[in-house]
Amino acid sequence: MKLLLGTLSRHTSANKQQTYRLLRVLNQHNHASLRPMFIRSHHNSRNNLKTVLIGGPVGASAHRLYFSRNESPISPWHDIPLLANNGNPGEFNMVCEIPRWSNAKLEIDTKAPLNPIKHDVKNGKLRYVANVFPYKGYIWNYGALPQTFEDPNVVDADTGYPGDNDPIDVLEVGREICVEGSVHRVKALGILALIDDLETDWKVLAIRTDDPLASTVNDIEDLELHMPGLVNATVDWFTKYKVPDGKPPNRWAFDGKPKDAAYARRVISGAHESWRKLVLGPQNDGLILTNVSVESSSHYLRPSHASDAFKALVSGGPLSLKGQPEDPHAKKNAEWHFVRDDVIQ
């Protein structure tokens, strides 16, 4: 599993073109709608990452959480390495998008410059998951594996369906509630294959390596032993969570049975290879591949040029949050929804 981390030094003329392109796309993406702005930083000492919040808190349509390393903006999708730096097989970096027990559908925006985390919008409305009894919001810390890609042009030999055009999802099951935008080293324990809109949507079950149970939970059988019922609850949650929105229950490959840690590692390795081909290839319609670490990529941008483009986005400095309207749909997060078993049959 080869990671493509560059030395950040070449392609000056190409960088000018990339900078101009990034500036143009930034201007097209919410330059006006991102105001009023609010900038928040939190620091991760282990990997020297910071996040910058622009456009208001979760529940504001302009909510964007950007990432920086050593004061230079980065893409959490392309510039955070997949492999944890300790070299242990089966341990990966995870970007937390959604803290456990919360309802807002937050995700890395693969179609925006620098790929910030945004509050997802569908049909003009901010998205929230319903509380399907007995669950409250997301029942794990939900995130993504950087430098992975589920290729929609490749049909998986085992599931029979292509990828969903996104990074691989992670369900982190540890004790602590993660923070949006935090990056954690996790150990893959197993994997589930959700079939969503005729696409394969892999869900990696993982645990933070600093969790008290991490040393004893190494595979799906250990997860069943130490957290009995969690895997079944996970399958039940994903099967039902769209039903309150009037959609049919989700379906599964492998009858909803989880595959083990070794299988999960193979899937992750394949998704990393798909990402490598993507970021080294030509511009993909819709996906933003600009990065500051894969020097051999035609989408590579020197950190100084990325900083110039980002400064243009936030020019004028932090502004007040006053005037940010409360999302009326957020109040629905307190409601229960009940799904009869016969609906799932």
Image (spheres, rainbow, N blue to C red):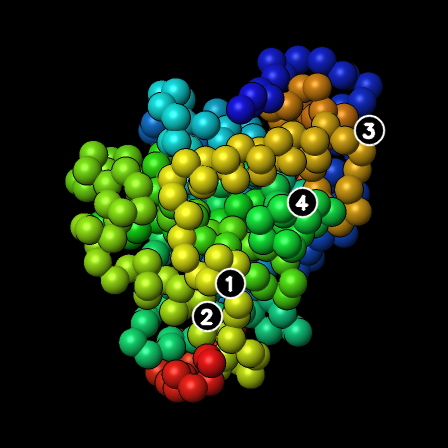
**Residue 66 spot, x, y in % from top left:** 53, 43
Question: Of label 1 and label 3, which has the lower sequence position?
Answer: 3
Residue designated by label 1: 252
Counting residues from the N terminus, which is met first, the one under dot 2 or under dot 4? 4
Q: How many labels does the image show?
A: 4
Q: Where is residue 185 in the image (x, y as percent from the top left)?
A: 36, 34
Amino acid under disc 4:
Asp
Q: Which picture quadrant has residue 8? A: top right
Residue on which the image places disc 4: 151
C-alpha span from label 2 to label 4 = 23 Å
Placement of 103 over or under 263, stated as above or below: below
- 25, above or below 72, in the image: below
Badge 4: residue crowd in 10 Å (few <14, some 14–19, many ≥20)? many
Residue at image location 65% in from the left, 30% down from the top: 276
Image mark for residue 17: 3
Residue 67 picture location, percent across and down:
51, 38
Mark 4–mark 1 distance (CA, rounded to whole Å): 18 Å
